[in-house]
Amino acid sequence: MNVMNLIQNNYEEAIAMILFGIGFSNLLLQQNLIKKIIGLNIMDTAMYLFLALKGYISGQKAPIVVNGVQKVTAYINPIPAGLVLTGIVVSVSVTALMLSLTIRLYRRYHTLNLDEITTQLEKEGL
């Protein structure tokens, strides 16, 4: 099985991996704190997409008993959806915390560039 066949059959997973790579490279290469936060959010979104894709089974329904059907094979697994929802809540909280710390750093150092903040910290002797 060649790589192109694998990507064509699993293009959703490939998109999730590409998004994760974009977010990770953004997190590593950018010096601006806001851009780093955006990169982290892109990585989070890629992971939620991947988890949602792994939890979905074509032809099966949400795990809500309807018309008396109680067979386990008739429904998708609810655990990935629960993990995604929990992850989204945690991600929003972490993003809010990072943005509030970024505002405090900006008020103190008047820049969002990590190199300039590090230089000012070295001048202060911290």
Image: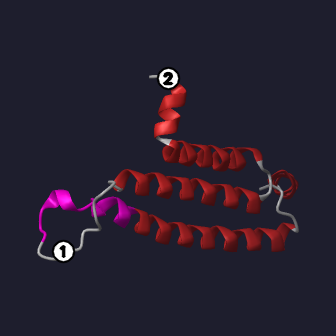
Identity of the amino acid at label 2?
Asn
Foreground residue among 102 and 87: 87
Q: Residues within 10 Å of mark 2 (few under 14, many from 20)?
A: few
Q: Please state if 111 lies on the left or on the right of 9 as rendered.
A: right
Q: Is residue 21 magenta?
A: no
The residue most toward the top is: 1
- Does 5 sit above or below residue 76? above
Q: Please state if 106 lies on the left or on the right of 56 as rendered.
A: right
Q: Which residue is mark 2?
A: 2
Assign the N terminus to one quadrant of the image: top left
- Does 114 sit above or below residue 65? above
Q: Residue 27's x, y, as percent?
A: 68, 50
Callout 2: helix, strand or loop? loop
Identity of the amino acid at label 1?
Val
Magenta stretch secondary structure, dominant: helix
Q: Which residues are magenta?
A: 69-83
Assign the C terminus to one quadrant of the image: bottom right
Q: Which residue is mark 1?
A: 65
